[in-house]
Image (cartoon, grey):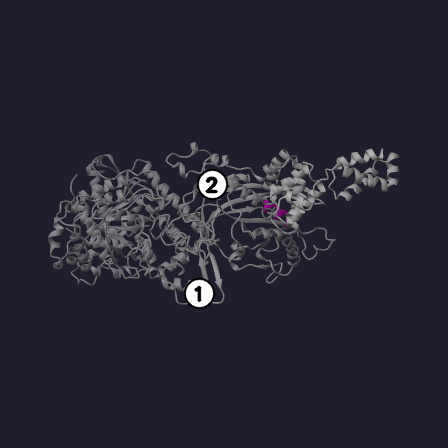
Amino acid sequence: MAGSPAGTTALLCHLNKLIAIYSPTITYQRHGWCVIRRICTSVSRCRSQAQTKRKSAPQELVGVVGLEIHAQIHSNTKLFSGSQVGFQAPPNSLVSFFDASLPGTLPVLNRRCVEAAVMTGLALNCTINRKSLFDRKHYFYADLPAGYQITQQRLPIAVDGTLTYSHLGGRKRNTVVTKSVRIKQIQLEQDSGKSLHDDYRSQTLIDLNRAGVGLMELVMEPDMSCGEEAAAAVREMQLILQALGTCQGNMADYEIQRQMVVLESGGTVQNETRSFDGKTGHTIPMRDKEGLQDYRFMPEPNLPPLMVYEACSTAPPGVAPSQLVVLEEVRERLPELPSVRRQRLVETYGILPEHSFTLVNEDGLMDYFEAVVRETKAGPRKVIGWVMNELQGLLHQQNLSVSQSPISPQALAQILNLQENGQISSSIAKQVFQELWKTPGKTAQQIVKEHDLGMVNDSTEIHRICQKVVDSHPDQVQAIRGGNKKVLNKLMGLVQKETKGRADPVLVRAILEQKTS
Amino acid sequence: MLSLSIREVSLALREGRISPTELCRKCLNRIKKTHYLNAYITVTEELALKQAQEAESRLLKGAPKGPLDGIPFAVKDNFCTENIKTTCASKMLKDYTPPYSATVVQKLLDQGAVLMGKTNLDEFAMGAGSTDSAFGPVRNPWSYATPYREQTGTEMDSDWVITGGSSGGSAAAVASLTSYLSLGSDTGGSTRNPGALCGVVALKPTYGLVSRHGLIPLVNSMDVPGIITRSVHDAATVLDILQGHDVKDSTTITHNPSTLTNLFDDFDVRNICVGIPKEYHAPGLSQETLAQWSRVADMFERAGARVEQVSLPHTQHSIVCYHVLCHTEVASNMARFDGLEYGHRSGVDSSTETMYSTTRHEGFNDVVRGRILSGNYFLLRQNYEHYFVKAQQVRRLIAEDFKRVFNSGVDVLLTPTTMSDAMRYTDFMQEDNRTRSAQEDIFTQPVNMAGLPAVSVPTALSNRGLPIGLQLIGPTLQDRKVLMVAQWIEQKVGFPPIRYHGDTGEGEMGEEVHEREQTSVV
């Protein structure tokens, strides 16, 4: 709390709570797909900070969360140079003269990066500016070789979009709650290099491999009211970007050091940029760079205005087609977005909306589900039950991702097929699933055989067991005969207990009905 | 031989009257003889001889690459040259060797032209005298030529005059006959100004016509590589080679520019309208320069051209706005010189910030530091609207002034290039760089604000025996037209070739200069 003016403590306590809720999303970051640079929070209806925490206070503090997301554009080469984008390359091996800011070099805009931003803008219902501009943002930092970053401060490529996102709410957390957040703008900008501080020798090493890689900065309006909403919105954004392929999902861990979650308490209270300390769970004022520095923005003189055309035919003559960014063409390439995908899952498979939500939101789960459906006779609604309960249950319990599941979709399909074919009962199927999880090398059939879990098909044997149960429970038989058919279920349970669940329930029922009639 | 134009010497090379290595040696000798001019920062003797040798074998086979094969040239030391030091006349880059060549340099090398060396300039091209270089000032070759010596009667090593700037070394190299062409850079007049004061042709092409890739920038939105030659025809020849789209410079025009060879065949002076902007009749304009301006205007009129007085009403505001824009871009462009990746690095390294500031303090001269300071001031959030935005708005008005005049039927504008002939160094240094830049760029920088083509042509010697030049300005991308008119002037004025008083050191000089083609009539 160092440096925070008196009187804001209550506010910050409240904000800390938000951050605490929010922190689960930070774990997304550990997979490094993008960076959340800043959470803007502002407080409305804040009359008297000291009193607001009292229950009797007429007006409660309302937290507001906005986000700026820096997503690294998935492209082969950097935003303004021809050097490759790569994450495991030796330090300073992917650095062009321009990336190192050698004097006399000039930026040349990468059309692929522009298309990625345009596509993202379209997916987020943005207005694509037909003309956008680049600006220089100045600050001295060792991993920013030119002394400025080229960004889009005045007129970004896309503005005024919306992101519709959902999260599971309700008491049982199984109701899909849908909300939306306004996207203020999407701007193209350069990434910086990486500073490696060697405290022992008190020196800093610079790796410029990342310098100049294209970023999309996605700025959301502060339309979210809590960390949970923010987390859901970020997840939806991630899914959209992955679906578009404009941002890769599997970048390296080096992003972690850059992950700062910054609080900006706004309104009339104060204007200060703060960072979140994940270890202590507190916010601390950030370095001057963010808070006080004047970036001395100016137009980038070496790049003409970035033009985007509706169609090839609307472009001026003389521009090479390979240089054109055409909305019509980008729109055609838009893939299925997560929301459409969920709708399709509900319609195609007849599953519940909350199930479609989980399928799409968990990495790889939808593919897993669809692979099982393809390979089994069992209906999709039966499959979804297995995926949601058995599979997800064990995955969560052991903190595994779908791709780490010891049971492949094919193996699960086999289990379901054994059940469908009447070779095992549903309770045995679950038992096989558990066994298979422990010994993933085996097949379902092997487990059924080894543990003797197959259906008892010998009808004389079933007859014998049924007779034994009927004989030893005369009172129940009497009740059934007296018209209380429900008691039959109890006898069925006893038979299944005897057979360890391996008898065909339909057959057992028929035999018991006959013997108690 | 050394005083010939490119066209003439190229013919001599083809006809075998001289070989490229002989020519190269002559130029190298002349560089040594004129060492006192301080025109070159680096002389690339070995490389030049090697290139000349290669040109020679091509010429012997009868397969020259083009009109520049074997022709010695010089390059202002703010254009990057692969494996050759590129200093910007600054301590900051005094040991900097770029790993690549500027597009314009590469194009000349690809044509077989022979690089003699890198020429002196004001540090980072900030100046109008070529007096503010970390390697010392450049001296105007005309200080040592017969007319000036006869007028002043002073000793060789005193009373010398400046070359103008910032491309003073490049202008001096061509004027002193050590190179047949040179590259300058022109941001506010830096090519035309020394061109006028050194009595050579200096072309500033339309912004975007010639690639800036590899030109260490002063003001990206105004910088243009400039061409310095001894004749307009030569300038056209060089522009023909340098112009065109460059994928490495996104501000170059994408369509194919018109070819400039044989462009003078269809020129009829009676079809053109010459505008005389009244605002260029500025206080401080010397009587002699004014007289030259009138003389040439009269020549046009007598020859049947239409000569009209026109108005460019925002001209007086141009220089102030030019400086605001110049300083802001300088502040930005100089930010990269922090001692980390290349260039000078201070030994004081108690912290990164200390290292930055001492590096920059040690590496830049007062002029550069001053511009960085004021540029950053103009860009501060609270000042941006008042200075940068206002200057941009005025810049547009200036561009519109020109557009309106050209749309009214004017083909070219005729103006002085500088206020007067070259000042003595001792006089020039009485004022600081900022004052001098404001005075010296007064007629040239509006052209850069508007991105137009312009050329300075020498017209006569002053009473002091120093060159006076006039400037022609054309509409955007009408470089060809500007050159056509310039050549007409060149042919009419009979500007004298440089002559050295008692230049016995180079015995041939006396005869050679007379050998030079006097304005061949088309």
The x, y position of residue A270, in whole percent, is 60, 56
Q: How far is mark 1 from mark 2, CA to CA?
A: 42 Å
Q: Which residue is mark 2?
A: A115
Instruction: Give the residues drawn in magenta, as a range.
Output: A226-235
Residue A308: image tag: none
Q: Position of residue B507 (x, y in %)?
A: 11, 57
Q: Are marks 1 and 2 in contact (CB under 8 Å)?
A: no
Say whether residue B171 is magenta: no
Q: Residue furthest front?
A: A460
The residue type indicated by label 1 comes to: Thr
Query: Does the rendering let one see residue B421?
Result: no
For disc 2, the neighbor class at 10 Å (few under 14, some 14 to 19, many from 20) is some
Residue B447 pos. (x, y %): 32, 46
Relative depth, front residue between A445 and B79: A445
Chain on which label 1 sits: B
The answer to whether B323 appears left or right of B410 in the picture is right
Residue A232 magenta: yes
Task: Tell me if mark 1 has few (under 14), some (14-19) or many (20+) residues whose alpha carbon lies within 10 angstroms of its own.
Answer: few
Number of marks in picture: 2
Which residue in the protein does label 1 denote?
Answer: B354
Q: Position of residue B99 (x, y in %)?
A: 33, 54
Give the dominant element type of the magenta stretch: helix, strand or loop. Answer: helix
Is B400 in front, or is A472?
A472
Q: Name the chain letter of the residue that bears numbered label 2.
A: A
Q: Amino acid at mark 2?
A: Glu
Q: Secondary structure at mark 2?
A: helix
Q: Residue B298: which quarter of the image?
A: top left
